[in-house]
Image (tube, rainbow, N blue to C red):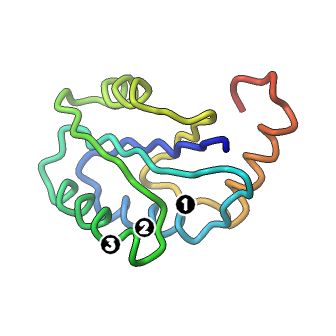
Amino acid sequence: MKRLTIMVCTHNRWKLLQQLLHSINSASRPVDWEVGILVAANACTDETHQFLDSYIVQADEKGWLSLEWFAEPVPGKSSALNSAIKRADGDLVALIDDDQRVAEDFFVNLCKLADSNQDASIF
């Protein structure tokens, strides 16, 4: 089974991250693809770490997508991205900003596009 990793970098915006994760979990999941979330908590000093730990505890019970996160101590989005890319284990990676929301069919369409364009390396 192929894996889609949803990569998110965030800095002290746990409330926006909460809204994004709600959007992600409300979207349709592609058939024949495993989907997981990877969050880089970039030099966060707010409640981001606690929020992410709470998400993980509740994920199975609530039917949410699996989530892994790590703390990137070096401030700056490029530091967070570089650290996250090293950890991404998907066949396909979708980079989504913490202040975005996804359409209900976003992941289904993205994975269909990847399945039909297997030589492509970026979309």
Relative vertical location of residue 110 with respect to residue 18 in this rendering, above or below? above
The amino acid marked with disc number 1 is: Arg
Q: Residues within 10 Å of mark 3 (few under 14, many from 20)?
A: few
Q: What's the CA distance linking mark 1 and mark 3?
A: 21 Å
Determine whether 107 is above or below 82 in the image: below
Q: Are marks 3 and 2 in contact (CB under 8 Å)?
A: no
Q: Residue furthest bottom?
A: 62
Q: Which mark is residue 19?
A: 2
Which residue lies under the disc numbered 1? 101
Residue under label 3, please give it.
58
Residue 6 is situated, as x and y percent measured from the top left of the image, at: 52, 46
In contact (CB < 8 Å): disc 1 and disc 2 = yes
**Residue 102 at x, y = what percent?**
60, 59
Residue at the spot 53% in from the left edge and 42% down from the top edge: 5
- Three-letter code, disc 2: Gln
- Is 81 placed above or below 41 here? above
93 sits left or right of 86 in the view: right
**Mark 3: secondary structure:** helix
Q: Which residue is pictured at 32% across the width and 40% down the height?
A: 40
State the separation of the CA atoms marked 1 and 2. 8 Å
Q: Earlier in the sequence, mark 3 or mark 2?
A: 2
Label 2 environment density (alpha carbons within 10 Å; few <14, some 14–19, many ≥20): some
**Quarter of the image that includes the C terminus:** top right
Q: Earlier in the sequence, mark 1 or mark 2?
A: 2
Q: Along the horizontal axis of the image, is 80 left or right of 5?
A: left
In the rendering, at what x and y percent does residue 72 appear?
Answer: 23, 33
Q: Is residue 87 left or right of residue 36?
A: left
Q: State the SS at label 2.
A: helix
- Of label 1 and label 3, which has the lower sequence position? 3
